[in-house]
Image (tube, grey):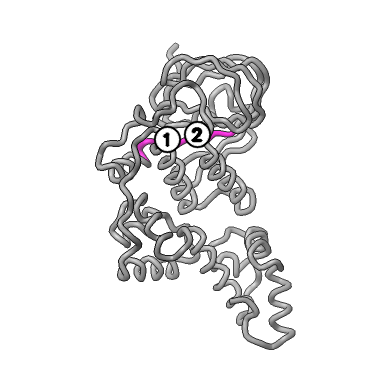
Amino acid sequence: MSSPVYSSFAQWYAEGHLAPYVHTMRSPGGVLNLLEAVQPAGDMSDPAVPDFVLYQCLLGGNRVSGDLGWGRFDVLSETGSFFPAAPDFANKVMVETPHRLRSLSFPIVQWQSALDEATDGKFSFNRLGIGGGTFSSPAIRSALRGLWALSDSEGAPSRLLARAAGCEILAELYRLGGGPLKPPKGGLAPWAERRSLEFMRARLSEDVSLDELAAEAQLSTFHFSRMFKQSLGVPPRVYLTRMRMEKACELLAQTELSITDVALEVGYSSNQVLTRVFSRVHKMTPTDYRRAVRSSNSEPLIR
C-alpha cells in the first residue's frame, strides 16, 4: 500500500500520525500556517510537502539529528532557535527527548510570485544560507512572538497580518543568506497612499489582505508594506487597527448598536475580540467608554 500524499503542511499535521500532539493550529486564508505541538522523543520525520517550514524549539537542550533538506546535521538545540525545512523534501528527524515546538509554514504557491517580484526573479531557497540544521535570529523570533501574541488576543491572524509577518520573516531570512531584497524607493506616491487608505476605510469590516492593498498601489506585497511604513510611520496592520478603533469609538458614542454589532462593523469576529483589542489600545473596555461618553454628554473621548 502506498503512503498517503499530503498537499500541505497543514494537512499533514491535521491528518498524519503526529496530529494527536498538536494543540494549536491556525491557518489564516491559507497564507501561512501556525502550529504549536508537544511531541515525544523519537522519529519526528515529515513527508514531502510544498511548504517551506520553520520549526522553533521552545525548550532547548535537546539533541536533534537528521536532514531537513540542506544536508545532515546533529546538534543540541537552543531555546528559541529555528530548524528550517526545505519544500518538497521528505525530511528525516530524530529527537532524543520530549519537546515543545512552534512552526510556521509558507505554502510556496502563496509566496513564489511575491518572492520573485521582490528579488527580480532571483529568489532561491538555496540562497537562504540557513543550512547546518539550526540557526538563531532575534528579528525572526520577535516577529513570530508578536504574531502569536496577536493571534492569542484576536484569534486566527488576519490575512493582512499573516502576509505582513511572512514578508518580514522571509526578508530577514534572505538577508541572512546574503541576498538582500531590492530597497524601496521612498514612500508611497500621494495617489497610492490615498487609494490605499480609501480602500482600507471602505473595507473596514472585512478581512482585507496585504495583496489587495498592494494591488491598489500597483506594487508587490514586499515593497508595498515597507513603503507604506515609510509614508505613514507604521505598518498597514497597525494603521488598520487605528482606523478600526476610531470607528468603534464613533459607533459607541453615536449609536445604540450592541458591542457585538460594533465589533462586526469594524472587522472583529466577536465582542470579546473587540474588547481585548479596545482595552489594549485605550485602557478601558468598550462598555466603559460608551458609559463615559454618555455621562459626559460630549464628543468621543478618544481621537
Q: Nearer the viewer, residue 221 or 204?
A: 221
The residue to which callout 1 is attached is: 176
Residue 299 vs residue 91: left or right?
Answer: right
From the image, state whether disc 2 or disc 1 is nearer to you: 1
| The quadrant where residue 224 appears | bottom left
Instruction: Point out residue 127 in the picture as x, y percentages from the top left corner.
Output: 35, 30
Instruction: Point out residue 8 in the picture as x, y percentages from the top left corner.
Output: 44, 31
Upstream in sequence: badge 2 or badge 1: 2
Q: Nearer the viewer, residue 260 or 290?
A: 290
Q: Characterize the magenta stretch by its predominant secondary structure.
A: strand
Vertical position of residue 187 compared to residue 120: above or below = below
The residue to which callout 2 is attached is: 10
Asked if the magenta segment contains residue 154, the reply would be: no
Which residue is rendered at x = 34% and y = 68% of the image? Answer: 195
Which residue sits furthest top?
Answer: 1
| The quadrant where residue 26 appears | top right
Which residue is rendered at x = 69% and y = 81% of the image? Answer: 293
Instruction: Point out residue 35 in the picture as x, y percentages from the top left corner.
Output: 57, 36
Residue 290 vs residue 231: left or right?
Answer: right
Which residue sits furthest front?
Answer: 178
Q: Secondary structure at mark 1?
A: helix
